[in-house]
Image (tube, rainbow, N blue to C red):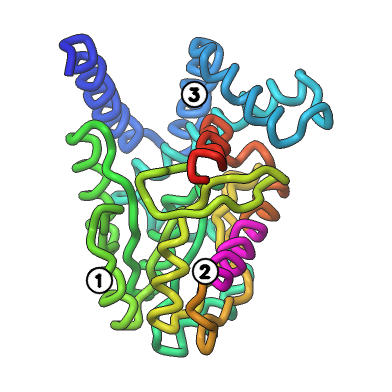
Amino acid sequence: MSRAKQLKRSLVFHLTHLLHISFNRLPRRLARFLGGWIALAAWFFITKDQHKVHRHLSLAYGDRLTDSQKRVLGREFYVNTGRFLVDVMRCRRHYEREIRPYVTVVGRRHLDEAYGLGRGVVCVTGHIGAYELLAVHMAIQGYPVAVVGRKLYESRLDRLLVDHRLAMGLVNYTTTDPPARLLSWLRTGGLLGVLIDTDSPRVRGEHLSMFARPAYTPVGQTILAMRAGAPIVCMVCMQTPQATYRIEVAPPIDTRNVPHTQESVHRITQQCVEQLQHYIEKDLSQWIWLHNRWHTRYREFA
């Protein structure tokens, strides 16, 4: 790694650490206000990200969105992310008093129905809204929750994130952990949270339709669910204009007695993708349009 890259990563870590301390000493309203403004400033400064957002919105919506609408969505995405990250940083000290009372859950009966089967639950979500708070809230509600995530490029930031998850009652797995470990967790009856809305050729996947374009999508979570006979439940945690959070839970997908075929994996995973797209389209400003969801082209796997 070059010295310039090392310096950049070190700067990002120390800045994050400083913001973490500062935001925890401020009232929530002021901290979220500052987080939003810092994110907005970053949006105007990082022109490369502006181009990425514009391009990816164009891939999904073409001319159905004007250039002005795409710019507005990009700015709103940055501001939403800044405010959400402030609440993530404040979780360990302030969740019970300042965040938990402002979280509502719609469709919790669907999760309870799936959890009650005793086979574990694969909870599918994406980088939508306050996705990191979703697992935290479920753990605080008393469910045994494990999450699967990729290690961050900066080891100190990754340690900070993992420590935060452990402190909030989560079990942390990485995408490089053996599938047998994840299967064992499901067989204890726990919830396993996975994000399936990014293009990552490092994990097993298939090209499925998202926004009417082929998108390389992880399928490992579906295979695990089928092996365990565990239901799959799609869910998201959306921010509201009132600085509250709304968790939406979809009806479970039953994987029992489903043939263990590639067609079944494809069909069930496509169903999950369509449910997540439904959530995204409720508020386009809360999805990670920075990410090129259609980076891996189909012919690369032909």
Per the image, label 2 sits on a secondary structure element best described as: helix
Which kind of residue does numbered mark 3 sit on? Ala
Instruction: Mark yes or no: residue 288 visible.
Output: no
Please determine whether, in this image, residue 296 is positioned above or below residue 58: below
Q: Position of residue 212 (x, y in %)?
A: 72, 46
Of the two numbered discs 2 and 3 on the same chain, state the one appearing first in sequence: 3
Residue stretch in magenta: 262-275
Specify the principal SS of the magenta part.
helix
Where, by quadrant of the figure, is residue 24 drawn? Answer: top left
Q: Nearer the viewer, mark 1 or mark 2?
A: 2
Does the stretch in magenta take in 61? no
Left or right, 294 with respect to 187, comes to right
| Residue matched to label 3 | 39
Of the two numbered discs 3 and 1 on the same chain, state the one appearing first in sequence: 3
| Residue matched to label 2 | 262
Which kind of residue does numbered mark 2 sit on? Gln
Q: Position of residue 126 (x, y in %)?
A: 51, 51
Which kind of residue does numbered mark 1 sit on? Ala
Q: Nearer the viewer, mark 2 or mark 3?
A: 2
Q: Give the farthest residue toward the right.
A: 64
Per the image, label 3 sits on a secondary structure element best described as: helix
Q: Position of residue 234 (x, y in %)?
A: 56, 65
Q: From the image, which quarter does the N terminus lie in?
A: top left
Please determine whether, in this image, residue 190 is positioned above or below residue 201: below
| Residue matched to label 1 | 180
What's the CA distance linking mark 1 and mark 2?
20 Å
Q: Position of residue 57 (x, y in %)?
A: 68, 30
